[in-house]
Amino acid sequence: MFSSRNPFDRLAALRRQASTKTTPLGYKPAAPSLKTNPTAPPTGFAAIGSYNTIARRWTAIIVGIPFVVVTSYVLYQRVVLGQEQKPLIAPPEGPLVAKHD
């Protein structure tokens, strides 16, 4: 079967032999990869070149809206309705040591 003693020739022959074997019943080949044709033009969201930039902007808007709404409402209460600013709690005076009786 093998005329030469080169191990690479034998390996190539084994690969050819393995590729001609039949597959068992019920065997399903692996699903093709998503990028079957890399030269095809992109479709869907991939067609938008700056999709990540647009997604980042929308995320910033969605996260930022609650902060803007709450801040605006608090300022409205202070300026228009005349509500006082909540006082900050003053730090305790003296050393911060527990007293033992």
Image (cartoon, rainbow, N blue to C red):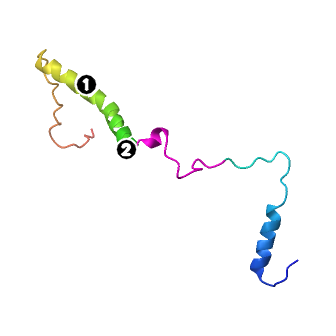
Labelled pair 2, 1 in contact (Cβ < 8 Å): no
Residue under pointer 2: 50
Quadrant in which the N terminus is drawn: bottom right
Residue under pointer 1: 70
Q: Quick check: is 44 in the magenta stretch?
A: yes
- Mark 2 lies on a secondary structure that is loop
Q: State the extent of the magenta-drawn residues as a range.
A: 32-49
Would residue 12 appear left or right of 38 to someone viewing this image?
right
Q: Where is residue 49 in the image (x, y as percent from the top left)?
A: 39, 45
Q: Quick check: is 88 in the magenta stretch?
A: no
The residue at 11%/20% (across/down) is 79
Mark 1 is on which residue type? Val
Q: Earlier in the sequence, mark 2 or mark 1?
A: 2
The residue at 80%/48% (across/down) is 27
Nearer-the-camera pick, 90 or 35: 35
Q: Is residue 88 above or below residue 78?
A: below
The residue at 12%/16% (across/down) is 80
